[in-house]
Amino acid sequence: MPFSSNSTMHTKPKVYIALILLLLISFFACHTQSTSTKVTQVIDGDTVILDGRYHARYICIDAPEKGEPYFWEATQMNKTLVEGKKIRLEKDISERDKYGRLLYYVYVGDTFVNAEMVRLGYAHAVPYSPDVKHQLYLEAMETEAKRLRRGIWK
């Protein structure tokens, strides 16, 4: 049975309203996923203290721990990239790791700090499911660091 022009007219406004609602939800979801703050202390190559009170760990990377080769270099590079600077934080799925640290992708201006640490050879790209939004990119940065024998890949 063919649709009458009357039923088509009632469907279009509903579709437009649904599309507008989806766009608004997407807009606000994207803008609430990131926030900015200041790094007050660098703990190591993948952990910082934000605003003097919150421990935060970089998602999808693993830098050398104290006593491991390149610990000092990774920590110093992280300090160079973020210490005392205003940063932008991006969440993935999980809020915290098993140690209670906040989990973030970190940016200083246009620099994606997680990726820069991997690209320069100061950290490994390590997937920690379910937080894997940028994992493929980080793995590409690790491949580049290995190919160019940077940092831990020397």
Image (tube, rainbow, N blue to C red):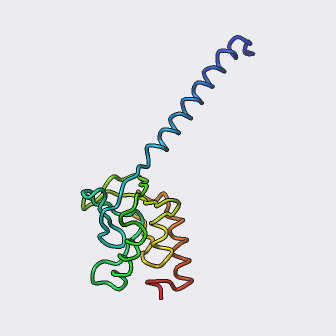
Q: Which residue is at 51% across, 70% downward?
A: 139
- The percent coordinates of residue 118 (x first, y second) are 47, 73
- The percent coordinates of residue 33 (x first, y second) are 44, 47
- The percent coordinates of residue 31 (x first, y second) are 47, 43
| Residue positioned most to the front | 84
Q: Is residue 75 above or below residue 91?
A: below
Judging depth in this view, the residue of 110 and 145 nearest the camera is: 110
Q: Quadrant of residue 71?
A: bottom left
Judging depth in this view, the residue of 1 and 128 nearest the camera is: 128
Q: Quadrant of residue 96?
A: bottom left
Left or right of 145: which side holds 93?
left
Judging depth in this view, the residue of 6 and 69 nearest the camera is: 69
Judging depth in this view, the residue of 121 and 13 nearest the camera is: 121
Q: Is residue 44 above or below residue 40?
A: below
Left or right of 45: which side holds 112?
right
Q: Which residue is at 40% across, 66% downward?
A: 82
Q: Is residue 22 above or below residue 17?
A: below
Q: Which residue is at 51% across, 74% downward?
A: 119
- The percent coordinates of residue 55 (x first, y second) are 28, 60
Looking at the rendered image, the quarter that the N terminus falls into is: top right
